[in-house]
Image (tube, rainbow, N blue to C red):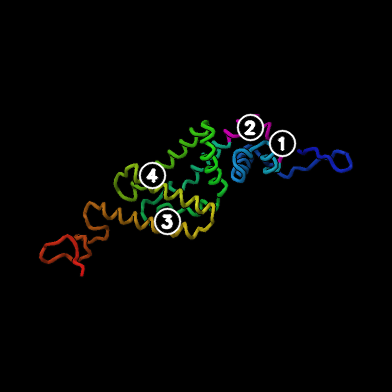
């Protein structure tokens, strides 16, 4: 497979294509990278072909129209995103919550950038909204399910969206600035907050630390007062 190239001498030669094994999935991965770098407006047959190291004609053959290329790239990104969801399959322990978030961003920044580009573009292209809404509905549901496991009680939409918004902000921050260490520090603080929430919700009222009095063993011998005195 090769493209014709016009050299300085006027005689047409064939440009060797380096990526013979590129199938549809590889072309869609290339499309994701193109959009991640330049936005949806940079997504063209030629840009994808150059990114994938194949001919322009091969991209046309696979997708037929730019609209079809966009639609399939979005679907491909949605499937890929759900496959690496950092909230899926957690242990149900606060100390493990979103444990793979920083690594997810580090290993697949193009996929994360692609999603943010689509979110912005959806304001101008309403046809992008259904797959994005489906993707984020799955994200929201995953966050709510994992939080319910961590806290051992049903979680309302407000709390689950608040936590998800914090996670998404960390993803965006790491994507733009790097600083995975900041992501991990923030996640550690979030896990502490969730552990405290889980303790507050303990049906035994023991603060989650096995102390029946719930006050660290310093119960008021007179039986009065709800908390320790402070001087």
Residue identified by numbered label 4: 161
Picture quarter with the N terminus: top right
Q: CA distance from mark 1 to mark 2?
A: 12 Å
Q: CA distance from mark 1 to mark 4?
A: 43 Å
Identified at 18% across, 66% down, the residue is 229
Tell me the quadrant of the picture where the C terminus can be found: bottom left
Circle 2 residue: 66
Q: Would you place residue 21 above or below residue 71 in this image? A: below
Towards the viewer: 202 or 166: 166
| Circle nearer the N terminus (1, 2) | 1
**Majority SS type along the magenta span:** helix
Write the residue at 39% across / 49% down.
Answer: 163
Query: Badge 1 is on which residue?
Result: 56
Quarter holding residue 3 = top right
Compute the Cα span from label 2 to label 3: 40 Å
- Residue at the bottom extreme of this rendering: 231
Horizontal side of residue 57 vs 84, given as left or right: right
Judged from the image, the secondary structure of the residue bearing numbered disc 2 is: helix
Mark-to-mark CA distance, 3 and 1: 44 Å
Q: Which of the two discs, 3 and 1, labels the residue nearer the N terminus? A: 1
Magenta stretch: give its range: 54-72
Residue hosting label 3: 187
Q: Position of residue 166 (x, y in %)?
A: 42, 50
Q: Is residue 112 left or right of residue 203?
A: right
The image quarter containing residue 43 is top right
Position of 71 compared to 97: left or right?
Answer: right
Marks 4,3: beta carbons within 8 A: no
> Which of pointers 4 and 2 lies earlier in the amino acid sequence?
2
């Amino acid at each position: 497979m090769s493209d014709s190239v016009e050299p300085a001498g006027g005689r047409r030669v064939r440009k060797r294509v380096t990526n013979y094994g590129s199938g549809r999935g590889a072309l869609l991965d290339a499309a994701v990278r193109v959009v991640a770098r330049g936005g949806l407006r940079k997504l063209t047959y030629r840009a994808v072909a150059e990114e994938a190291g194949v001919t322009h004609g091969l991209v046309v053959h696979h997708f037929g129209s730019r609209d079809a290329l966009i639609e399939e790239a979005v679907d491909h990104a949605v499937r890929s995103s759900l496959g690496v969801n950092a909230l899926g399959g957690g242990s149900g322990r606060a100390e493990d919550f979103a444990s793979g978030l920083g690594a997810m961003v580090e290993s697949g920044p193009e996929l994360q950038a692609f999603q943010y580009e689509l979110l912005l573009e959806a304001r101008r292209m309403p046809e992008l909204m259904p797959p994005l809404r489906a993707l984020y509905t799955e994200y929201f549901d995953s966050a709510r399910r994992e939080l319910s496991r961590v806290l051992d009680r049903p979680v309302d939409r407000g709390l689950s969206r608040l936590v998800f918004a914090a996670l998404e902000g960390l993803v965006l921050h790491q994507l733009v600035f790097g600083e995975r260490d900041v992501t991990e520090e923030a996640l550690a603080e979030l896990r502490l907050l969730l552990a405290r929430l889980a303790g507050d919700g303990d049906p035994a009222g023991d603060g989650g630390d096995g102390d029946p009095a719930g006050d660290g063993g310093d119960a008021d011998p007179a039986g009065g007062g709800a908390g320790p005195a402070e001087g």
